Amino acid sequence: MNLPRNNARILWRLPLLLGTALLLVPWMHLMWNATFGELVPSLRFRIKHSIAGLVVEAGHPLGWRDFLTGRYQKSLSETIGLNSPLYKWAIRWKAQTYYTLLDTSPFNNVVIGRRRELYEPTYTREYCQRNVASMLQKAEPWAARIRQIQDFYEARQKLFLYVISPSKAAAVPDALPRGYSCPAPEADRRDKVSAYRAVLQRHGVHYIDAASLVDNAGQSYSAPMFPRGGTHWNRLGATLAASALTEAVNRASGQTYLTPFSFSWQISYDSRESDRDLLDLLNLPIPDDHYPVPRVTTRSEPHLPCQPAHITAVASSFLFELAAALEQVACPPELHLWFYWDQKLFVYERNRRDQLPIDTSERRRDLLDWLDVLILEENEAAFPESSQVRKLYDFIGAETAAEASNRAAAPGERRSEETPARMDP
Amino acid sequence: MLFYEPLFLFAFLPTFYLAYLIVQRRGAVILLASVLFYFWSEPLFVPVVLLSAVLDHALALRIARAQQGSYAARIALAAGFVSNLAVLVHYKYTRFLIANLDALLSGLHVTPLFIPEIALPIGVSFIVFEKITYLVDIERRISRPAPDFATYLVYVFFFPKLLAGPIIKYHEMEQQLRGMPRARFDDFCAGMQRFIMGMAKKTLLADTLATGADMIFHDPVPGFREAWWGVLFFTFQIYFDFSAYSDMAIGLARMLGFRLRENFNMPYISCSISEFWHRWHISLSTWIREYLYIPLGGNRVPVGRRYLNLWICFLASGFWHGAAWTYVVWGAYNGLFLMLDKLFLLRLLDRLPRIAANAFAFAVVVIGWTIFRATSLEQAARFLEAMVQPTLPGTLAGVFVTNDMKLALAAAILICVAQHTPACVRLREIAVSASMRGFAIQSALALLFVAALGKALADPFHPFIYFRF
């Protein structure tokens, strides 16, 4: 059927014109904000960023150099897109379409496995390219360094524990996506942690293999140790590690530094925070968040007077759940977590978690004076190469050198012990 | 500034188009917008182009004044040719030439030469080739010099075709530049439709295929399966990416009332390499023919010399694509098959069923693209080896061909195959008809635009897991 001729020119092209009008909405928004919005800020249309995973840099680099190198142009174009009224809609509906219709991750830093199990590609790639022989070559000097760190602390009558946290890809390998290339031999994938443990034992390192602990417990507890929508262990897995940590600390110290506890758990379908950190990143308008997450209840006898242990941790994000588990017991420890050594400081005290900026003098104090226990954590996907271990080792090395230099100085020239020999770089 | 970027779509294009519709001096609006468009991307290169254009314009006037074929005309043309080529060589090939010279000198224990990094301006290859056509067209008396310098600058900087072609020869645009057409409603609609098709091809298909191709070509030693996936992804990525850009350029120009030549004509249905090069990057192959092959003698020279010229032209074409040996070998490879076509292959392929000839030509093209895409000749060899060893496993962890890539590949193949079928031709006719079916197709196009725009906005987003801290 043909449309009436006098209406034909415009009417039959109406869909196209409406589609084109889609460009005018963000254009008008931009023009308004760039003109009237600049003159009268209260008239600006503001877009609320509720996109998970979005990191907005403050301001544009604005200098001639930035313009000549293209940095300014790239930054401005990104900002225009980010502040467009269409942006949130675009992210969410791309995500939902990919997730629901294509069973594919919309973003390259989340992998969707079988049963919609979510992984970070860093962990899946590491798992699938494991090579124990190559790892062992690096593991020997690495374990020696960790032993040196241990010796440094034990010489100061501080406790030291090296914690190996688990990788979800290694813990739940059967859910890796069909067709995901995994060329590493099965023996290498399975035996990496046990081979590394043998090296640690040979070097006399005090460690907790939370990776194997969680792996074995998964079968006996018949509950998942990792949430479907998250990359970190869940509270049950972390509680098991916290329990092992508590026993190890108390055994090593010969006293009750950390309050012993027991725990029970039950399945809930209310995923929160790290239970859904990867799922949240997908930004699905209809989130697929109905999956089991263990809810843990701890029981402990408060011992009086309560003198919380001081724990300094140099660790990755796997310490969050472990610290949260420790905070549930009576007389919880005070824990200062130096996140990847120099990214953030998280302070767990009086049942609160505060996030503070890095202060190198505070870090030195935490690492040398304040602490009772030093926890050094490394994920099984990261050893033997993680930056936080290397940086702690360098710090210890600098301190040791400074102490040696102090001892070598003549008595009259000996520096005050209050003065640090060398500041952290 | 790329055509699917927010800055272009939400700021530059609506503002420019509004000005173009309102302001009487359309040429001035196009020129200002085009120079600004290019200055935004290449602030340091714009003055170079302007100076070069001043020289071109002066030389063009000299050529026009001199007698055709005279010494003065030829000297002026040569000066223009050399000055333009010098710009291209400086920015695109200096480092490549020096690196290869150093490789030779190192064998003689001579200290290697050092040159600082030279940033490659986007679109330089297209700009230089177009400027050469201006001088040659005038010398051949196909065109007259531009009425003024501003008109010539509009030709040089015309933003729809500036970054990635098509390569518009001056004589193809001369009349339109003189007339400076008005943008009519039908031009806007036809242009927008074309632009939407281009955006959809680019963001929905080409970018998805690119993710797959890049992932696999990152693997130094692919397996059989990975090699084939990677090569197929790239084969369709390059077509949809390049033709999409041409669609967007042609669409934008049409929105302004300009008609640019087509650049692609269903190349993957070709039944020979000769036919392929009549359908692929048509503006380049016609440029090569008119401005290189014919001056080398064309078909007027003896057969042997003719084939050699053909091969040289494709060698140059390969080199034009990039400063690396892979491009040179790719050009030589294509030149070889063109020679073989002339010798016997075309006659042989003509005797085969069309589908068999098409399959053969496609296979030759795919092998060529493998060389083209590889980061080195060594990688190209490894990929080609892997493609003929069905039991060869992959070695890189994390290679994962996802459903969106598979869907994009399937869609790409279907589009390439279906394009020339009567049903598809009929669909194109219905799309521009004032009927209910035309309305339905327009609605589908609008939805396609929404999807393409959404993906263009969403694709640069890479969520950071620790964003809460």
Image: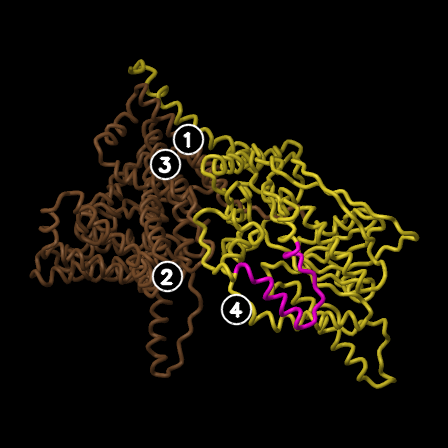
Chain colours: A yellow, B brown
| Amino acid type, residue under disc 2 in the picture | Thr
| Tag 4 residue | A134
Q: In the rendering, at what x and y percent does residue B287 appear?
A: 22, 51
Residue drawn at (42%, 31%) of the image:
B22
Q: In the rendering, at what x and y percent does residue A422 appear?
A: 76, 72
Q: Nearer the viewer, mark 3 or mark 1?
A: 3
Secondary element under disc 1, as helix, strand or loop, is helix
Q: Nearer the viewer, mark 1 or mark 4?
A: 4
| Tag 3 residue | B195
| Tag 2 residue | B375
Q: Quadrant of the N terminus of chain A?
A: top left
Q: Is residue A200 magenta?
A: yes
Q: CA distance from mark 2 to mark 4?
A: 27 Å
Marked residue chain, label 4: A
B225 lies left or right of A323: left
Q: CA distance from mark 1 to mark 4?
A: 69 Å
Using the image as rendered, state which of residue A113 and residue B121 is in the foreground. Answer: A113
A343 lies left or right of A116: right
Classify 10 Å Cα crowding around label 4: few (below 14), some (14-19), many (20 and above): few
Marked residue chain, label 1: B
| Amino acid type, residue under disc 4 in the picture | Ser
